[in-house]
Image (cartoon, grey):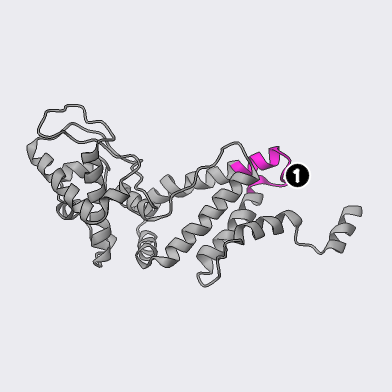
Amino acid sequence: MGAAQGGAAQGGAAQGGADDGATASGADTGAAHGGADRCPADPCAAPGDGAADPEPRRGRPRSAAAERAILDAVIALLEAGEPLAGLSIERIARTAGVGKATIYRRWTGKEELFVDVVRDMEPVDPPVSGTEGLADLRIMLESLRTRGLAQRSSVLLHNIFAQMKSHPKLWDEYFGTVIAPRRAAVLAAVRRAVAAGELRDDLDVELIDDLFVGAVLVRTVHRPDAPLPDDLVDRIITTLLQGLAPAAAASSAGRA
C-alpha cells in the first residue's frame, strides 16, 4: 500500500517530555526510511514542542513522523529476518525510537499494528463511486489483480502473508478489518449491477460474486505462476457476460 492507513489508531492522553523526545527520535528514524514521501493518510497527533497539550488531535506532522517511524521499524525488523511471532512492542518501540505508550496510543496490540503494516505495503485501494454496478466491480477486481502483482514482486510481502496464515489471531484481525470489507464492497457492486439490469436477476447474487472474484483469485493466489496481464479483468468480465456455452448451444437452450 503506497500510503499508510491508520484506521486502527488509538487516541490517548498526552505524554510528558520523555515521550516527546522519543517521538522526535522516531521522526528521524522514519525520515531515514523514506518517511517524508510515505506519510500516513490518517496520522495520529502527538504533543507539541514542549508545550502542554492535554488533547492530542490527529493530523499533526510530528505524530505523522512517529507513526511512520513505527511502521518502518516493523518493516526493517522483518527485512532483517525477524519473524512476526518474535516481534514485541518493546522491540518495535526501541527500533522506532519511541516509547511503548506512543505505539499503544495508536494500536491496541501487535495484531492491529501488523495489519496496518501490511496495508501500508500493499497498493492502495482505489476509490469507487458506490453507485455504479459493473464499473465499480471492474475497479475492485483490477485492484485485486494489482495486489496479486505486488505480492509476487515483494518477497517480504509474500513471506508476511505466509506467516500471518499460521497465526490465527493475526489472520482473523486482517480478515475482519481488510478482507471482509473488501468482499462486502464487491458483493454490493454486484447487487447494484443486478438492480441496474447489467447482470441477470434470476441467479444467486453470491454465486455471481464468486464467479467474478474467484476467477481473479485463482490467478493471483492459487496459480502463482499464471500471467496477470493488464487486460485480465476485462477478459474475465467479458467472458462471464457472454457465457461459456458455444453460440449454437446457447441458441438452442434459449429456444427450449
Magenta span of residues: 189-206
- Count the marks: how many? 1
Tell me if I can see residue 17 in this picture: yes
Query: Which residue is most to the front?
Result: 37
Whether residue 196 appears in magenta in the rendering, the answer is yes
Q: Nearer the viewer, residue 48 or 122?
A: 48
Residue drawn at x 56%, y 64% as measured from the top left: 218
Label 1 element class: loop
Residue 24 image point, x, y percent: 14, 44
The quarter of the picture where residue 79 lies is: bottom left
User: Whole-percent x and y of residue 102?
Assistant: 19, 42
In the rendered image, which residue does mark 1 sit on?
Answer: 202
| Kind of residue at badge 1 | Asp
Which residue occupies the extreme right position in the image? 255
Image quadrant in which you'd find residue 189: top right
Q: Is residue 153 above or below residue 53?
A: below
Q: Residue at x 84, y 59 (%)?
A: 250
Residue 140 image position (x, y, % from top left): 55, 49
